[in-house]
Amino acid sequence: MDTVMSVIFPLIFIVVFFIIFIYSNKKKKEALKKLSSVLTGNIPGFIFTPAFSGEYQGFKFSIVLIPAGKSTPEYLKISFFKTSSFKLSISKEGILSNLGKKIGFLHEVKINDEYFDKEFLVSSNRPDKAMFYINNGSIKDATRELFNAGFESISINGKLILIQKPNYTLERDLEPQNVISILQKLICMAGALA
């Protein structure tokens, strides 16, 4: 009897976990399905993290809804596939970034734009290319617009542009016209990498 119970209880737990998981992802998948009405793409089959992969104006992209962890909020993660000859990271200046610079952990690339340098922390493996790239006025504008939309980081890793937004809202952030607006900013950023 004890052996049967030791098998049944974990099995019941697993079944309940999957039912809750599937139900909680239903709204997310419905929001992603709305995107397929205006964007070319698809929602991959059975995966644990709701996602949408597509193509917009010749560029491939993916949208992934990362669930919350024990100490992290849920994230909206958009990857825009474009190769580059350098790596770049942009984040907002803050207490932690200032501390990181003081102890030598972070190495900042100065853009020589007083306002941009105060507002953002830029790091790169190729500071010369990063400075040239960001000094393009449309890149500065796209960067500010993405951060104003709630994204907290922009990174270019040689293969893609990645932006992340914590605590996203399905109704607002995955509304098709809003997603298209974000993709247009990423097209601007990708175009300047050419």
Image (spheres, rainbow, N blue to C red):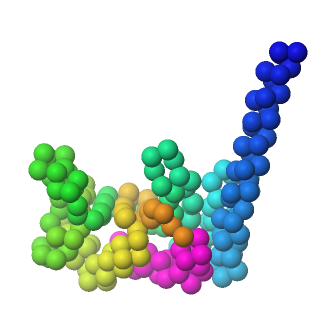
Taking 63 as reference, is 85 left or right? left
Does the segment drawn in magenta span residue 174? Answer: yes
Does the segment drawn in magenta span residue 28? Answer: no
User: 91 or 111, which lies in front?
Assistant: 91
Q: Residue at x 79, y 32 (%)?
A: 11
- Point out residue 168 in the picture as x, y percentages from the top left corner: 51, 67
Taking 47 as reference, is 69 left or right? left
Q: Residue at x 51, y 47 (%)?
A: 69
User: Is 4 situated above or below 55?
Assistant: above
Q: Is residue 56 visible?
A: no
- Point out residue 3 in the picture as x, y percentages from the top left corner: 83, 16
Looking at the rendering, in which quadrant would you find the C terminus?
Answer: bottom left
Q: Residue at x 14, y 46 (%)?
A: 104
- Point out residue 75 in the picture as x, y percentages from the top left corner: 50, 59
User: 136 or 9, which lies in front?
Assistant: 9
Which residues, given as a range, are shown in magenta?
170-194
Taking 62 as reference, is 148 left or right? left
Q: Residue at x 77, y 49 (%)?
A: 19
User: 103 or 161, which lies in front?
Assistant: 103
Q: Is residue 35 visible?
A: yes
**Res 148 quadrant in image:** bottom left
